[in-house]
Amino acid sequence: MTQEFIKKIIEASAATIAEHAEELTDLDRAIGDGDHGINMKRGFTEILNISDDISALPFGKALAKAGMTLVMKIGGASGPLFGSFLMAAAKAVDDVPSNRDEMLKLLDGGIEAVKMRGKSDVGAKTMLDVLAPVSDALRAADADLINVARKAAAEALENTRDMLATKGRASFLGERSIGHIDPGARSVVLLINAVCDVLETA
Ligand code: ADP
Ligand code: MG
């Protein structure tokens, strides 16, 4: 059961990243160095390649292995950041979250790790600007969590457009970073939607 679930999450995540790789790279071309789609695709393709090994593990260990894979396979900033997210999430939960509180533990554990690793916080125009609003929205919601997460993610992504980047490569552009959505934040939206798709069909 857990094995099948992990496999579906891996397949859905790798598929959406591969499908949108060009879009992610275009976003990164506008305010970075144009490699975000390539980076993410490389990492998630590797996770897909070893999905049998990963999905044979207990949930926490599967998250940790997926995270390690991203750290090792992605050269850019996003590898260690997404990797740290998954490795910290792995420490926060042992099993597949079965309720909102467990889901929030996973998410918030990951968010703290990204903040630490990236020496970053909300408002710097990064992946955190989708992760944190989704966590906040889930905490405040009392029903329909999947749609709450999707909606919060989409709105938060759009809100990155007007932000000034103060972390990562986009910060080198200063004021010129304003007017573009953040590529890492777009990746988070894709991944959240992939997880939601799997949860809806489970
Ligand atoms: P690189 O910036 O090394 O080329 P990528 O292009 O793969 O790496 O990833 C860029 C994304 O990483 C950004 O869009 C942003 O969301 C995220 N990012 C960069 N630096 C930080 C940071 N310090 N904290 C959080 N996220 C960051
Ligand atoms: Mg880049």
Image (spheres, rainbow, N blue to C red):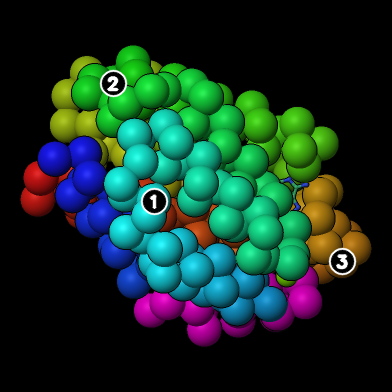
Disc 3 Cβ-to-ligand 1 distance below 8 Å = no
Q: Residues within 10 Å of mark 1 (few under 14, many from 20)?
A: many
Q: In this figure, which residue is indicated by the disc labeled 1?
A: 54
Pinpoint residue 179: horizontal percent, then vertical percent. Answer: 67, 66
**Tag on residue 100?**
2
Q: Residues within 10 Å of mark 2 (few under 14, many from 20)?
A: some
Q: Is residue 128 left or right of residue 102?
A: right
| The image quarter in which residue 38 lies | bottom right
Amino acid bearing label 2: Arg
Numbered disc 2: secondary structure: helix
| The image quarter in which residue 202 lies | top left
Judged by depth in the image, the label closer to the viewer, 3 or 2, is: 2
Q: Is residue 53 left or right of residue 199?
A: right
Main SS, magenta region, reads helix
Q: In this figure, which residue is indicated by the disc labeled 3?
A: 173
Amino acid bearing label 3: Leu
Q: In the displayed structure, would residue 15 be above or below residue 151?
A: below
- Identify which residue, 21 or 150, lies in the foreground: 21
Circles 2 and 1, Cβ within 8 Å, touching? The answer is: no
| The image quarter in which residue 52 lies | bottom left
- Identify which residue, 58 or 80, lies in the foreground: 58
Please name the residue shown 42% across and 63% down the image.
50
Please name the residue shown 30% across and 64% down the image.
11
Q: In the displayed structure, would residue 152 be above or below residue 160?
A: above
Numbered disc 3: secondary structure: helix
Pinpoint residue 5: horizontal percent, then vertical percent. Answer: 21, 46
Distance of label 3 from label 2 (alpha carbons): 38 Å
The magenta span reads 17-34
- Please tell me which of labels 1 and 3 falls first in the chain: 1
Judged by depth in the image, the label closer to the viewer, 1 or 3, is: 1
Distance of label 2 from label 1 (alpha carbons): 24 Å
